[in-house]
Image (tube, rainbow, N blue to C red):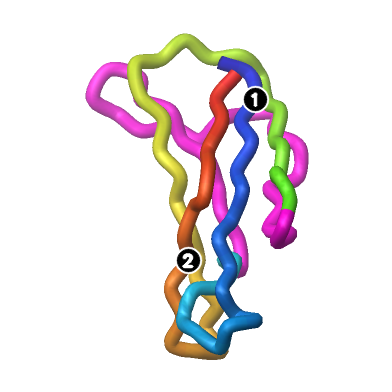
Amino acid sequence: VSAVEVYWFDDGRLKRHCRVPKSWKLLYREGDAWKPVTGASQFGTEPDKYNRVTFDSVETTALRIEVQLDPEGPWSAGILEWKVE
């Protein structure tokens, strides 16, 4: 795996409670440990588009996204679609 694309769900225009996150990072599983990918491009949080991240290739059985929510409100974050390449 050397790239992912995340399409963040944001229903702010509908005055609901799901927004894009403040930030995020991608981890991969190596044995029993979770490690951040290395050599990553920017982890975007733009709404209404895929946010593509490329990184140094890894061989793994699992990926995990860790999200930092926006501290300014009582909002959650959601993923509409996640592509793994």
For residue 57: magenta? no
Query: Residue at point 40% right, 38% down?
Result: 64
For residue 71, above or below residue 45: below
The residue carrying mark 1 is 3
Magenta stretch bounds: 22-48
Image quarter of the C terminus: top right
Residue 77 tag number:
2
Query: Residue at point 58% right, 83% down?
Result: 14
Front tag of 2 and 1: 2
**In this picture, residue 57 sits left or right of residue 59:** right
Secondary structure category for the residue under label 2: loop
Query: Residue at point 55% right, 47% down?
Result: 25
Between 82 and 31, the one nearer to me in the picture? 82
In the rendering, at what x and y percent does residue 50 appear? 70, 44
Image quarter of the N terminus: top right
Secondary structure category for the residue under label 1: strand
Between 32 and 51, the one nearer to me in the picture? 51
For residue 23: magenta? yes
Circle 2 Cα neighbour tier, 10 Å, few/some/many (<14 / 14–19 / ≥20): some
In the rendering, at what x and y percent does residue 4 appear? 61, 31
Between 26 and 35, the one nearer to me in the picture? 26
Q: Amino acid at mark 1?
A: Ala
In the rendering, at what x and y percent does residue 76 appear? 43, 73
Between 2 and 32, the one nearer to me in the picture? 2
Q: Reading the chain from its start, which is encountered first: label 2 or label 1?
A: 1
Query: Residue at point 43% right, 87% down?
Result: 74
Circle 1 Cα neighbour tier, 10 Å, few/some/many (<14 / 14–19 / ≥20): some
Label 2–label 1 contact, CB within 8 A: no
Q: Amino acid at mark 2?
A: Ala
The CA span between labels 2 and 1 is 21 Å
Picture quadrant where residue 31 is located: top left
